[in-house]
Image (cartoon, coloured by chain):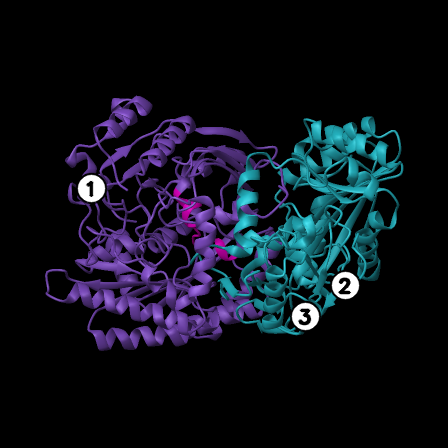
Amino acid sequence: MQTTPDPVLLQPANAAEVAAALRRASEARQSIVIRGAGTKSEWGRPAARVDAVLDMRRVNRILAHEHGDMTATVEAGATLHDVNAALAIHGQTLPLDPPFADRATIGGLLATNDSGPLRHRYGTPRDLVIGIQLATTDGVLTKAGGQVVKNVAGYDLSKLVTGSFGSLAAIISATFKLAPLPAASKTLRIGVGDKATVAEIVRRMMASQLEPAALEVVVGHRSLTILIRFASLAAVVDAQIAQATAVIEGCATDAAVLDGDAERALWHELAAAIWNQPGAIVRASWLPAQIAAGLGELDRLTACTTSVQARAAIGAGLIRIDGDAPAQATVIEQLRRSPVFGNVVIRRGSDALKAVVDVWGPHGDRRPLFDSLKRAFDPNGVLNAGRGPL
Amino acid sequence: MTNVDRLFLSELRRIVGNSGVLDDPLELLTYECDALPHLRQTPAAVALPSSTAEVQAIVRLCALSGVPFVARGHGTGLSGGALPVAGGLVIAMARLNRILDVDIANQRMTVEPGVTNLDITKRVAPFGYYYAPDPSSQQVCSIGGNVAENSGGAHCLKYGFTVHHVLGIEAVLPNGELVHLGGSLADTPGPDLLGLIVGSEGTLAVVTSITVRILRRPETVQTLLAAFDTIDAGGAVVSDIIGAGIIPAAVEMMDSLAIRAAEAAVHPNFPDADTVLIVELDGPAAEVTALFDGVVTMCRRHGATAIEVAQTDEQRARIWRGRKAAFAAMGRVSPNYYVQDGVVPRTRLPEVLNRIRALETRSGLRIGNVFHAGDGNLHPLICYDERIAGQAEAASDVAAEILSYCIEAGGSLTGEHGIGADKSQYMPTMFSPEDLALMQRVRAVFDPGGLCNPGKVFPTPRMCGEVPGPYRRHPVEAAGLGERF
């Protein structure tokens, strides 16, 4: 994050202190950036002037785990890792596996709506959040949604702040619906020879009645891999692996079944892999059936290497682009013009890249609403230093 | 602000043609209420647009003329969400009923808001797909109405609500501008305005096209019906199921009054019991088979007096017919009834249901209970006879008291029917003035003029002409042209 010298570091201990900090910043017209663990602080546009950083990590209690109701209420500064360690005592989980899962906070996950391969089965934070407490820049604490999994009373403001990148309000706490921890898990790792075969496997899996927890496509340096994860009772997992093997018959150049530590290591390493390599990283979407066309287009657009990690049946993933900033900028602009890709957003990029290509891309006919919402929530424009989408 | 005058009507006719405007008092009768007939208001006129462009032109005209408007689907809503505004316009979306795109390969479908929920499934069923949210009114309710209310259904415990199955919408904002939220591609950057609009009860925009996710039919479905002597025993089975880490496709309970009503109406051959529990598991055959035996064992352990496992699709359909007909069936056992939709944390169900039973005794009004036991969504059916002086008011008081139990237990005023005009006065029991003020601020962003379905969701003094009170037969029902679901 680019900041002016010495932004004040605020470390509120509770909701009231967060609200008071926002009100003071707003009244003084001081730019304030809300921060969790900082795992995604380089996302978004380069920050304009930052007068204060609001570190949410002390607001980190697990307020309730109603295991009989399969819900939990946790404060924004709690890490996903700590939350899930507590939920596991009763055999439950907040089923998210985003990058930086060991450090990422609940507030940061909601603000970015970030997720990982388990999105295939469980969705993103917006699909799991059922209630929220917010602090707005007028220093007021409000709530929306509730503590029950089914509830349509009032506007669902938890959706509104999901993906807002801290541009509208501070998330104090959130209530989520949970999932039972599966008894067993195995992953079928399939090496594939070409893009058409990738598409064929994805097509067959989507048309099948199999219910994987994840269906991931990983494109590396001269490698194409599909990972199909099943999580259920042990016998069910084995039966599904056998069925999946039959479904993809004739497609794989090699296949292996991983479980236990090997499986855990595979997914753990995969979550970090793309981030451990150099280059820009963009998030992009496509229609799932267009995956071969998408991968073909990437080959055509990128003279230098790319790598891709994608949720195949969702049609969304991360694309890593090598090269210098001008070359990366060209690729991103071409991706935005491509008939296959959409919603191309820079996740990681140098300031040089962000100087020539907007991080967020055009907002189309949503722009006026974004602007009005920003004015309504943050009339003095103090939140998040212009980094977010609004 | 209201100004539906001759000029307005002639402009309206210019937009949608003579056949697209209704202003004859007799024709307007159909539109004076939704499926919550005790709230009624005759609109000044009804417009029946056939295209997005016509909706835009109508909304622009309303904005220019300061005429409040209410979008209406097929009028099956149970909270008065489509209740007209006095002197205002109803925009009836029934003619926007085309299926625009069916994309099996990408498991999505784009439809206009007047398409019925079940027609989506019917269109893709031959390919082995279905649309998951299944409100009891799914044969007749519109997908546009589902979007407005964030409708659920019996299967939302496992599959979620409308908001989890809508990928994108096209909508006309109250200023007449068109906006596209979400879409066929995932991950529109920025705040989730799609998730905000779904469930906003028609107060933020008029939705003109909807892209939904369709799901592959599960490999196996297993359904059982178990009878118990007490609600507590049924509740204990549900606790065991959840405790075992099983997420059923559906868990429904009905009490004796609801059972008797369903039996009288559609003869599902339910056992004569205090409580019946319906449990449905779906998914991969290996999983369903492994878990289903466990559920049967749990029912036995808690003293089930009868267990019926559906052996055929026909048997399963019969069980569901009994459950889904429960609301309409109350007409067989009571001249009038009033249905509420409060939610409690699932673990508090037995306690709240026992409070409701005590209230039943105390109030002298019979209360049938049909509920989604997996997610704690109650549907108490309060029986009364409007011909007996004071009963309608008593029913309204009983409903309010039940909602107070739900809030005290940490629940919600509504799980799927919406706040609408029916429950807006109770919103302050669930939300603080600050909570409601922030929501109103959001509303003002979309609808600064306050013309888009005003008087709903948020507590306001009752509008003139709005009559609180008992259920009366809808004119369509009275004419024998339709029945309530």
Q: Residues within 10 Å of mark 1 (few under 14, many from 20)?
A: some
Residue displayed at 30% across by 49% down: B485
- Which image quarter: residue B94? top left
Q: Amino acid at mark 1?
A: Val
Q: CA distance from mark 2 to mark 3?
A: 17 Å
Start-end of magenta stretch: B145-157
> Relative to residue A278, is residue A95 depicted above or below?
below
Say yes or no: labels 1 and 2 on the same chain. no
| Dot label at residue A103 | 2
Q: Amino acid at mark 2?
A: Arg
Is residue A65 or residue A240 the one in the foreground?
Answer: A65
Is residue A15 at all visible to an observer of this figure? yes
**Secondary structure under the numbered disc 1 in the rendered image:** helix
Residue A305 screen position, x and y as percent: 88, 35
**Secondary structure under the numbered disc 2 in the rendered image:** loop
Is residue A7 rendered to the left or right of residue A92? Answer: right
> Relative to residue B31, is residue B238 depicted above or below?
below
**Secondary structure under the numbered disc 3 in the rendered image:** helix
Residue on which the image places disc 1: B476
Is residue B481 at all visible to an observer of this figure? no
Q: Amino acid at mark 3?
A: Ala
Residue on which the image places disc 3: A88
Shown colour of chain A: cyan
Residue displayed at 64% across by 49% down: A211
Say yes or no: labels 3 and 1 on the same chain. no
Q: Chain of mark 3?
A: A
> Which of the two discs, 2 and 3, sits closer to the camera?
2
Q: Is residue B155 magenta?
A: yes
Q: Chain of mark 1?
A: B
Residue displayed at 20% across by 37% down: B28
